[in-house]
Image (tube, helix red, strand yellow):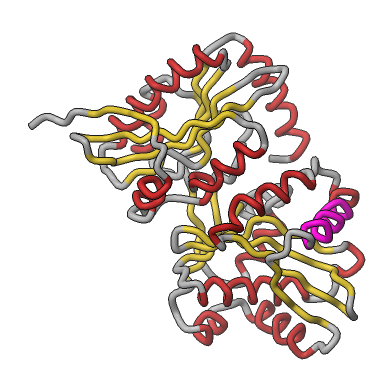
Amino acid sequence: MSSIYKIIEITNKNEWEGFLQTCQEKTFLQAWNWGEFQLSMNKKIWRFGIYQNDQLVSTALVILMKAKRASFLLVPHGPITNSSAKKEIIKILLEKLKELANQERADFIRISPIWERTPENEKLFTNLGFRLRPMHTHPESSWKLDITPKEETLFDGMRKTTKYLIRQAERNKDIEIFQSNNIKDIDTFNAMHLEVVKHQKFVPFSLEYFQKEFNAFAPDHQIALFLAKYQGKVIAASYGIFWGNMAFYHHAALLPEYKKLPVSYLLQWEAIREAKKRGCKIYDFWGYADPVKFPRHPYAGPTLFKMGFGGYKQEYVKTQDFVISQKYWLNYIIESVRRIRRGL
């Protein structure tokens, strides 16, 4: 029997999440609750399911991103699939997104796939008329750690310096690490985030963004805030998202005046230990950039820190754009300039 494909919107959370549990290549950017977060930020979304002979083989969360210079349809770290028929999946998704772009007056389509960066996977997009984006929206490579071994084994696999700094922080009686599920602690995190912004000069996320992201994942116990105190004062914090048997190191902040204290190392280690307790198998440190090849990249310094815990890199197909209208090229120029200025 020849395969018959169809694409329809999925409105059932259990069907969506149940399918994603069967897929290996995924991140929380395609989770049901990430869609709920986007809705709370007044974004328009669609959750598409691609079926092959009535069996669900792929999902794609689509978000309408609006800006004065151009609007676009974004598929963050998707589509997700457990099928080898990737060519057919991208083809049917693109046709649907072109219809949607015309309906919503979007100027282009942007897909940041979670698929492994191979010539074969890259060719799938090139053959359909996609082009490389001028600037990525989400990480195109990540540093990951298999956390299924025992804690002792994980600790032994770390870089010598990382182990030393964790032990140093553990012995320091002035340092305390605790976990919070209290929305009020987001204010504390945000205040530190803004201090970091002053020193590193990047565009900050808003307090509303942090609060609504937290509220989207909290009902399913998929998010936690890890905080570090020094002499009774909160000086560092990080977000952990626990979803799909994976844990994600998503946001972090450390007050610049305390950067010589090894609290970040202990904070990270406690987050990994919590991920193990929750039954996670992979700890995703999020963005990665080769610190040797790209020493000026904003991810280079954090990558060295992440690599100290052991693990491996995973590179995804680079973000792909499909041009719908001429307004795309204005956006292309602006993003190209922004990328150069940021050293990306």
- Across and down, in percent, residue 76 comes to 53, 39
Q: Main secondary structure of the magenta part?
A: helix
Residue at 44% across, 79% down: 149
Judge by depth and name the residue closer to the eye, 175 or 294: 175
Q: Which quadrant, please, contains the N terminus?
A: top left
Compared with 203, 149 (above or below) is below
Q: Nearer the viewer, residue 169 or 65?
A: 65
Tell whether position 35 is magenta. Answer: no
Q: Is residue 35 above or below residue 329?
A: below
| 228 vs 16: above or below | below
Residue 305 drawn at (x, y percent): 68, 66
User: As rendered, which of 301 and 154 lies closer to the eye?
Assistant: 154
Residue depicted at x 50% and y 17%? 101
| Residue 127 x/y as whole percent | 36, 23
Q: Is 186 situated left or right of 10 in this image?
A: right
Position of residue 231 measured from the top left corner of the image (x, y, whole percent): 90, 80
Q: Is residue 326 left or right of residue 116?
A: right
The answer to if 188 sits in the magenta stretch is yes
Towards the viewer: 213 or 137: 213
Residue in the image at 47% along x and 65% along y: 282
- Quarter holding the C terminus is top right
Q: Tell me how many marks there are.
A: 0
Magenta-tinted stretch? 185-196
- Going by the picture, which residue comes out furthest to the left? 1
- Relative vertical location of residue 141 with respect to residue 102 in this rendering, above or below: below
Quadrant in which residue 196 is drawn? bottom right
Residue at 52% in and 51% down: 28
